[in-house]
Image (cartoon, rainbow, N blue to C red):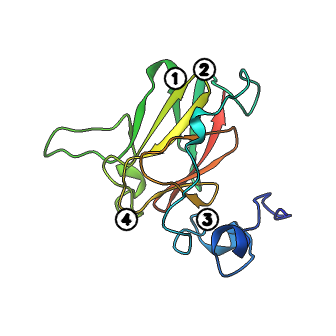
């Protein structure tokens, strides 16, 4: 079932251990229920499963666009530059991730310095949580650290409570 206003899927208790069956958009500015999700996603690493050659929504596109929710900011990632780290800069040690989120309230929203990594394989574009403090969520489901998950065009990714939509080009 999907929300008629925003098109997002409803979250059901039996799927995510969330106490209500409400639209993700109605629950927080992050457009996802983040605090009530189970602590770990225990499903097998799906990045190793075969995927078709790229068609809109699947496979490995030339570019991945991350569009920050409630903002006009877009990050365009050329897949030839992958892998790329998403997170916050650490000037003490001279670290700056390829996708620098500090200017977008990343600290306040729970983004770690080395939060997640986007990469590609023969099976498609993947995201992996780098053992972040506040978790990485894919379409409302918390990812287990260090397990790659396939991304699809239109997916909703949350780093802590910083939410972005994934588009392929």
* Labelled disc at residue 108: 4
Label 4 and label 3: CA atoms lie apart by 17 Å
Query: According to the image, label 3 marks what residue?
Result: 32
Marking on residue 62: 2
Residues at discs 2 and 1 in contact (Cβ within 8 Å): yes
> Which one is closest to the eye, mark 2 or mark 4?
2
Disc number at residue 78? 1
Kindly state the secondary structure of the residue where label 1 is placed.
strand
Q: Position of residue 60 (x, y in %)?
A: 63, 24
In this image, 59 relative to 117: left or right?
Answer: right
Q: Secondary structure at mark 4?
A: loop
Q: Secondary structure at mark 3?
A: loop
Residue 112 percent location from the top left of the image: 34, 54
Q: Do the residues bearing badges 1 and 3 touch, measured as CB atoms within 8 Å?
A: no
Q: Is residue 11 left or right of residue 35?
A: right
Q: Is residue 114 left or right of residue 121?
A: left
Q: Residues within 10 Å of mark 1 (few under 14, many from 20)?
A: some
> From what the image shows, is residue 115 above or below residue 108?
above
Q: Quadrant of the C terminus?
A: top right
């Amino acid at each position: 079932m999907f929300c008629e206003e925003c098109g997002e899927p409803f979250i059901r208790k039996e799927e995510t251990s969330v106490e209500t069956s409400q639209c993700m958009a109605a629950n927080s500015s992050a457009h996802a229920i983040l605090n009530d999700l189970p602590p770990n996603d225990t499903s097998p690493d799906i990045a190793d499963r075969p995927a078709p050659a790229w068609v809109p929504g699947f496979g490995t596109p030339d570019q991945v666009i991350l569009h920050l929710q409630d903002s006009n900011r877009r990050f365009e990632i050329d897949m030839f530059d992958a892998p790329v780290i998403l997170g916050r800069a650490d000037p003490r040690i001279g670290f700056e991730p390829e996708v620098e989120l500090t200017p977008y309230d990343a600290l306040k929203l729970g983004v770690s310095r080395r939060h997640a990594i986007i990469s590609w394989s023969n099976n498609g574009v993947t995201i992996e949580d780098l053992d972040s403090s506040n978790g990485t969520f894919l379409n409302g489901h918390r990812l287990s650290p260090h397990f790659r998950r396939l991304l699809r065009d239109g997916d909703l990714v949350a780093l802590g409570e910083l939410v972005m939509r994934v588009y392929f080009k």
